[in-house]
């Protein structure tokens, strides 16, 4: 089989260790040398790994996308080598022959013969933006879960607020909860705290707010959940500000993205964080659509078509 990369390395990455295999031209015409060595995953050990690879004049380093552990290795080697992040699905080895040494050698051979393609890894500044937008998404999802827990507490206390209002947490709902915590128990008095269009439903609110709210029990739960929601609101606001600062140089691009129907500021920021700003890494529009997981696949055999449903899009390293 033809050798497409003369001096390459394959890394089997784990949390605490990295097994590295290097393949390079041997003494004979078609002979190949192979060297394998294990390293730790600390910054100092990764610098030693880089020095070891440089000693063999390695030009290309391939590594499997292993959880989050590849990030430290990739970040350490990226300034010194051309690094490929490889999809684990493309690295299947022979069953019954698996160890760290064998895996690193197998990765190296696949890279050597051009049998794998690199995953899309955006540049460092986009990866940092992605960290911020994904954390914001996680905080927003946690806020939603906290509101759902709040709804469960209200239901257990007999308060049917969501039977009248569209949400268990709003300006009106917050005012009513604060009043309940302050000792107000009269449903009519609580209903009068409604604001905006909800005031047109005050008669229904009086009935829905009749309750068995126990301040010693339900009150403790509500206080904890409201405090949690407030802390998440502050965290999300802080992340919004930081993301705005990072994306300030891309203001014109964000404004352009917001002209797409359904795309607002946050969605535009996420699009940049997930896809980057250099579309030349995708050969065609079709490649980009496939990477994003928004087009069906082809799966047919013996004249029969099987399911080609769309798969999940990029996550983590951004595979293509």
Image: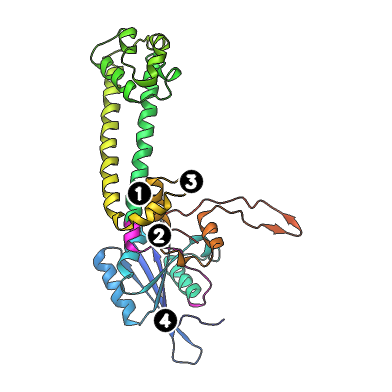
Numbered badge on residue 261: 3
Secondary structure of the residue carrying numbered label 4: loop
Q: Which of marks 3 and 2 is nearer the N terminus?
A: 3
In this rendering, the label closer to the viewer, 3 or 1: 3
Question: Residue 163 lies in what quarter of the image?
Answer: top left
Q: How far apart are marks 3 and 2 (CA)?
A: 20 Å
User: Residue at label 4?
Assistant: 7
In this rendering, the label closer to the viewer, 3 or 2: 3
The residue stretch that appears in magenta: 112-128
Residue 68 visible? The answer is no
Looking at the image, which is closer to me, 128 or 300? Answer: 128
Give residue 33's position: percent from left, percent from top.
43, 83
Q: Which of marks 3 and 1 is nearer the N terminus?
A: 1
Secondary structure of the residue carrying numbered label 2: loop
User: Residue at label 1?
Assistant: 133
User: Residue at label 2?
Assistant: 276
Q: Distance between the residues labelled 3 and 1?
A: 21 Å
Query: Which residue corresponds to the image point at 35% horizontal and 49% vertical from the top-left?
Result: 133
Q: Distance between the residues labelled 1 and 4?
A: 37 Å
Query: Which residue corresponds to the image point at 52% horizontal and 50% vertical from the top-left?
Result: 312
Q: Which of marks 1 and 4 is nearer the N terminus?
A: 4
| Magenta-drawn stretch, dominant element (helix, strand or loop) | loop
Q: Tell me: residue 217, above or below residue 33.
A: above
Give residue 51's position: percent from left, percent from top.
28, 76
- Is residue 110 magenta-colored? no
Secondary structure of the residue carrying numbered label 1: helix
């Amino acid at each position: 089989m033809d050798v497409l990369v003369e001096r390459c390395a394959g890394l089997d990455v784990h949390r605490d260790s990295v097994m590295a295999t290097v393949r390079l031209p041997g003494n004979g015409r078609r002979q190949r040398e192979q060297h394998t060595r294990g390293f730790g995953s600390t910054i100092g050990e990764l610098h030693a790994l880089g020095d070891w690879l440089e000693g063999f004049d390695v030009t290309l380093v391939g590594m499997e996308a292993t959880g989050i552990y590849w990030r430290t290795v990739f970040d350490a080697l990226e300034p010194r080598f051309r690094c490929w992040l490889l999809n684990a699905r493309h690295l299947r080895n022979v069953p019954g022959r698996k160890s760290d040494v064998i895996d690193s050698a197998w990765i190296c051979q696949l890279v050597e013969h051009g049998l794998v393609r690199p995953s899309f890894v955006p540049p460092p500044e986009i990866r940092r933006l992605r960290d911020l937008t994904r954390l914001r998404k996680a905080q927003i999802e946690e806020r939603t879960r906290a509101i759902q827990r709040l709804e469960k507490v209200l239901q257990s206390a007999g308060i049917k607020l969501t039977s009248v209002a569209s949400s268990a947490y709003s300006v009106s709902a917050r005012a009513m909860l604060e009043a309940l915590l302050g000792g107000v128990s009269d449903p009519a008095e609580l209903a009068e705290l409604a604001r905006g269009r909800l005031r047109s439903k005050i008669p229904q609110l009086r009935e829905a707010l009749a309750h068995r709210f126990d301040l010693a029990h339900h009150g403790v739960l509500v206080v904890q959940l409201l405090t949690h929601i407030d802390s998440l609101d502050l965290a999300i606001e802080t992340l919004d500000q930081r993301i705005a600062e990072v994306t300030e140089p891309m203001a014109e691009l964000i404004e352009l993205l917001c002209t797409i129907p359904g795309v607002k500021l946050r969605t535009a920021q996420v699009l940049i964080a997930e896809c980057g700003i250099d579309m030349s890494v995708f050969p065609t529009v079709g490649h980009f659509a496939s990477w994003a997981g928004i087009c069906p696949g082809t799966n047919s055999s013996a004249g029969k078509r099987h399911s080609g449903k769309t798969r999940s899009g990029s996550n983590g390293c951004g595979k293509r």
